[in-house]
């Protein structure tokens, strides 16, 4: 079975005040179908830059990204992206926010209302359909954002520290909800976090090199749902990365 995402020798540089800033360098990644892959790294190491590239929102300085065997040159409707920040439309209530991707696809009002209601119930927001984002807690807005992303029927989900602004108990609860929604769906998930204490739970350790090593992750039948916890580190432009242990 071919990989969903293949990243080879990926690099991304930014220019500021005449200096070349390296966000990513020599990064390889393979994500198999049905995988839940967790990327762990501290702030500023290139995690969000990587997801922006995987979402097709920006172009790489060098290297290649292939999605389902084809070069990724821009956004794909098959790829859903949940960013760190709330992007709910403040003038739309929960139901109309969740309906938005279906509305953009031109689905009839009756069918998209039914589909949105089913998603709202799946993420635990039944009873809040007519509430506006300003009337919801942080955790409820994250649930609504997740439901809206799923409303686009993506095959691959990119999640950029989606619960980082929440308290530890709620973060754990939402991560468990996310794993429940993912389990058995056949979707592939790339989940980025900087929280080494509360990532979605996997097991075991894999030895790798810090600084964007290659990774191939598949969740075997009967195993923990999170196949690999892969760590990204800030990469020095002057010194090679040191070896580290990477939990999985």
Image (cartoon, rainbow, N blue to C red):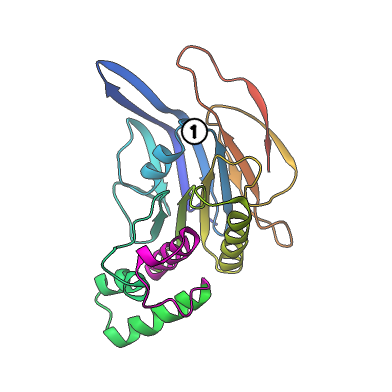
| 218 shown above or below 183 | above
Residue drawn at x 58%, y 46% is 38
Residue drawn at x 27%, y 74% is 103
Q: Position of residue 222 (x, y in %)?
A: 74, 62
- Whether residue 2 is visible, yes or no, is no
Q: Position of residue 67 (x, y in %)?
A: 41, 51
Quadrant, the N terminus: bottom right
Q: Position of residue 146 (x, y in %)?
A: 45, 63
Residue drawn at x 39%, y 50% is 85
136 in the magenta segment: yes
67 in the magenta segment: no
Q: Position of residue 173 (x, y in %)?
A: 62, 61
In the image, 32 versus 91, the foreground residue is 91
Quadrant, the C terminus: top right
In the image, 35 versus 117, the foreground residue is 117
In this rendering, position of residue 75 left or right of residue 5: left
Local packing at callout 1 (Cα closer than 10 Å; few below 14, some 14-19, many 20+) is some
| 121 shown above or below 37 | below
Where disc 1 sits, the SS reads loop
Residue occupied by mark 1 = 43
Q: What is the span of residues highlighted in magenta in the rendered image?
A: 123-152
């Amino acid at each position: 079975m071919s990989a969903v995402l293949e990243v080879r020798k990926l690099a991304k540089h930014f220019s500021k005040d005449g200096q070349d800033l390296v966000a990513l360098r020599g990064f390889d990644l393979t994500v198999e179908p049905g995988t839940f892959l967790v990327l762990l790294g501290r702030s500023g190491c290139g995690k969000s830059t990587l997801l922006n590239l995987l979402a097709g929102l920006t172009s790489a300085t060098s290297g290649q990204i292939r999605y389902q065997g084809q070069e990724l040159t821009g956004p794909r409707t098959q790829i859903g992206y949940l960013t760190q920040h709330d992007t709910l439309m403040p003038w739309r209530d929960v139901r109309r926010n969740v309906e938005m991707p279906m509305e953009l696809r031109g689905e009839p009002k009756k069918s998209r209302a039914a589909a949105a209601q089913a998603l709202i119930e799946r993420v635990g927001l039944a009873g809040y359909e007519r509430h506006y984002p300003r009337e919801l807690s942080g955790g409820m807005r994250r649930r609504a954002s997740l439901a809206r992303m799923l409303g686009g029927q993506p095959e691959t989900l990119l999640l950029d520290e989606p619960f980082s602004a929440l308290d530890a108990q709620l973060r754990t609860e939402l991560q468990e909800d996310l794993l429940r929604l993912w389990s058995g769906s056949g979707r592939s998930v790339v989940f980025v976090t900087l929280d080494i204490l509360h990532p979605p739970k996997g097991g075991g350790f894999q030895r790798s090199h810090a600084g964007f090593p290659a990774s191939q992750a598949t969740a075997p039948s009967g195993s923990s749902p999170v196949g690999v916890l892969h760590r990204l580190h800030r990469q020095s432009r002057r010194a090679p990365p040191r070896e580290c242990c990477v939990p999985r």
